[in-house]
Amino acid sequence: MSDTRRSLDSRPALHWRILIVFAGTVLVWLFLYHGALLGRDYDRPTHVARAILTTVLVVPLVVAARRLLDRRPWTGLGLPSVRFGWRRLLLGMACWLIPAAVGFALCLGFGWVEIRLRTSVADALGVAALLLVLVFLYEALPEEIVFRGYLQHNLATRLPAWQAVLGQSVLFTLFGFLVGAAASLDRLLLFFVFALLLGGFRVATGDIWAGIGFHVAFQTVAQLFGDVGDVFDVTGSDVLGLVAMGAIPFAFGWTAMQRLHRNRLGWQARDPEPIG
């Protein structure tokens, strides 16, 4: 028996590996969001600290799990270097931003929504740039590495792709509930649909960069026009969120991704485990 086969045979069972990484991820978010270390009240310095610490804690968690639990190389998680992934990152952002811009135009044009800038354009752009970085570090990168990277890949080594996407979507929704980010039915539904969409991006492209881009675009704009950004007064925010930030970009973003990668989509396929 080869050393590789002995290593694979002696590693924890798949369900234990998934449970350990999922539980570790939940504990990180609970510690940083609800723990006494940074306090529970929101302010910009606390947001910065949470974002940095989340990436600093979650990425090594996944690296350690990949090496110590899976005993396989990093490449299986679908995160090639930025040198190879930047185009898909921008594609993912475009898949949300372009249809969302249409949605904003429709909402404003029909008078469903009114938006007023509270501050200067320069200040708003500065907040937008900061939020872009914070969303990448606090939500997009760590969540995609864990759920569409580690968990979806591991599920897809045993299950067809569509079942792996469904499985990580359930786990992502449970994660949102446990950390307090999805405490209502509409939020639970948003988490589930969002995870399905991003899981589909992973199947279509073979990596998680497009999902990271879509995630960054969605969360940055949502926070910019919400209480976190605190630079706009929005009348009709529920309509804006449902139509311009949700239904239109989710539907058209997936349609675009599906057409661009229709030759790659294989819902019955399984992920191979890289050797190394």
Image (cartoon, grey):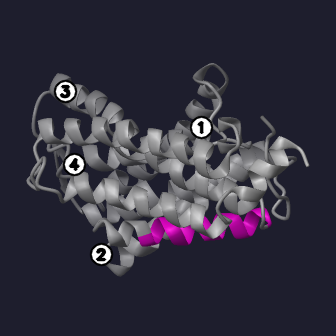
Q: Nearer the viewer, residue 63 or 266?
A: 63
How far apart marks 4 and 2 lie (CA) works out to 27 Å
Q: Nearer the viewer, mark 2 or mark 3?
A: 2
Three-letter code for the amino acid on which mark 2 is drawn = Ala
How far apart marks 4 and 3 lie (CA) works out to 13 Å
Residue pointed to by mark 2: 183
How far apart marks 2 and 3 lie (CA) works out to 34 Å
Element carrying mark 1: helix
Which residue is depicted at the point 37% across and 80% down?
A: 185
Element carrying mark 3: helix
For residue 56, side relative to residue 256 (left or right): left
Residue 83 drawn above or below residue 89: above
Residue 209 is labelled as 1
Q: Nearer the viewer, mark 1 or mark 3?
A: 1
Which region shows up in magenta? 160-174
Three-letter code for the amino acid on which mark 1 is drawn = Trp
Q: Give the mark nearest the N terminus, 1 or 3.
A: 3
Residue 150 colored in magenta in the image: no
